[in-house]
Image (spheres, rainbow, N blue to C red):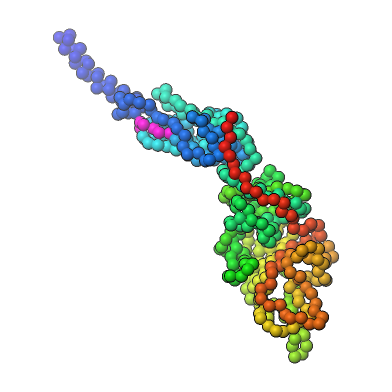
Amino acid sequence: MRREAIIRTLLFFFPTLVFVIALTAPGGEHAFRTGPLAEVSIGQPPHYVYVSNKTLYLYSSPYAPWHYPAIIVVKVFYPTAVLTSSTCGAVVVSSVGGQPGTYPLDIVIPPGFQGNCWVNFTHPSGWRDAVLLRVRLIDWYPGAAERAVIALNGTGWQFIQVGQDGALYIWERPVARLPVSGCVFVFNKSVLLTEAQPYREVVPNINPPVVAPSDAGAVRYGAFVKLHGVSQLYVYKAPCVMSRRLNVSEPPSLVAEIGVTLPAPTGPVFDMPRVEKSVIYGTELRNINYSESIASVYKLYIYTYSTPVGLWGAVLRHNFALTTLLTIKVSLFRPGGEPVRIGDDVWIYRMGNVTYWIHGPRPYYLCEPPCGVPTGWQKPIYVVVDPAGEWGGWPQILSVKRDVLQPWKP
């Protein structure tokens, strides 16, 4: 009888024991499966990350967190979760898993961090693994693999733009081409406020192109820098940093004499343009007024823009009809007085304390004896208006080069 009692007891407790093991084991119904609970490996790091076994050589930035997406991969073989943590706050989730499968893990290095950082993976069953992050702090915008380095020499506020094709503009005037285009500008170890403004050709197939701000088209990224001699500006191939729109006034009216004198039965008349179309565009940094005007013998395409730095500007394009008429005055742009030439295609008007800087063809001249009215498209006229008379003119481009971020290792 004693033998039968023992057998009955074992038959009663054995299923219960199996159930308890299955319930408390990491894999539930897979409790008796052999092999590790999970496996930690390195994912697909960017080219500027060096990998040695389970050690990653990463960068950090002073400007923002450096995000490394899916740089670590955790394979979980049981329906359970693996706990994650790090010694530098680089892990943004507390666990991965839940079901068998592959789970990529993002690493985010805090701004300014430098040194060693352990990423730990643990499980209540006692399983554990780790990845070592060796982090170096560099003066580089996080996440960008390359940048353009522009050496400038100048003084005062400058409005810099970079087109998506790499074209570099200063106060709307094209001056160079960059090997890298992007929306992040770093100057004097600061990330600048930027704008993203589309431009489109308003008249096709003209050289140089007749472009103007629009609500759609090729985007230019722009920022203001204040120069004090030789400086370096970095442009990173990275998305725009969201920023609030500055409170900028409307563009002031462009008060200037624009037109040509034409013969008439009653005597010479001045052919001034009449506005046919006007549109206002607002960016994060500027307000822009684009207009098209027409006169008897030409059409004028113009946009003016205000800025938060005390200067404002304009761009003018004239298209004259083919004519044999004679004139005694050509005024492409004349706010008053006589233009003074100070360099190749650079002119200034001084009106009291206000200085008008002009880059383009001769903006105003008289013809004695009479000369022919201009014909066809005239070169662009770029205007920078300095109400304080302190601006020093367009800066000089000393050099342009491309930097590519390379991996580091001990």
Evaluate whether residue 259 shows in this view: yes
Determine the residue positioned at 76% across, 71% down.
363
- 185 shown above or below 27: below
Asked whether residue 146 is drawn in magenta, I would say no
Determine the residue positioned at 42% across, 22% down.
126
Of residue 10 and residue 137, the one placed in the foreground of this image is 137
Of residue 287 and residue 76, the one placed in the foreground of this image is 76
- 346 shown above or below 191: below
Outermost residue, right direction? 352
Q: In this view, does 176 lie to the left or right of 122?
A: right
Outermost residue, bottom direction? 265
* Among the 4 quarters of the image, the one containing residue 176: bottom right
* Among the 4 quarters of the image, the one containing residue 123: top left
Evaluate whether residue 109 shows in this view: no
The segment highlighted magenta reads 74-79
Outermost residue, top direction? 2
Q: Where is residue 300 in the image (x, y as percent from the top left)?
A: 67, 74
Q: Where, quadrant-wise, is the N terminus in this rendering? A: top left
Determine the residue positioned at 74% across, 58% down.
394
Determine the residue positioned at 76% across, 75% down.
331
- 329 shown above or below 80: below
Q: Is residue 18 left or right of residue 227?
A: left
Q: Where, quadrant-wise, is the C terminus in this rendering? A: top right
Q: In this view, does 12 lie to the left or right of 404?
A: left
Of residue 405 and residue 276, the one placed in the foreground of this image is 405
- 181 shown above or below 142: below
Q: Position of residue 249 (x, y in %)?
A: 70, 61
Q: Where is residue 58 in the image (x, y as percent from the top left)?
A: 56, 35
Outermost residue, left direction? 1
Q: Where is residue 128 in the image (x, y as percent from the top left)?
A: 44, 25
Of residue 369 and residue 97, the one placed in the foreground of this image is 369
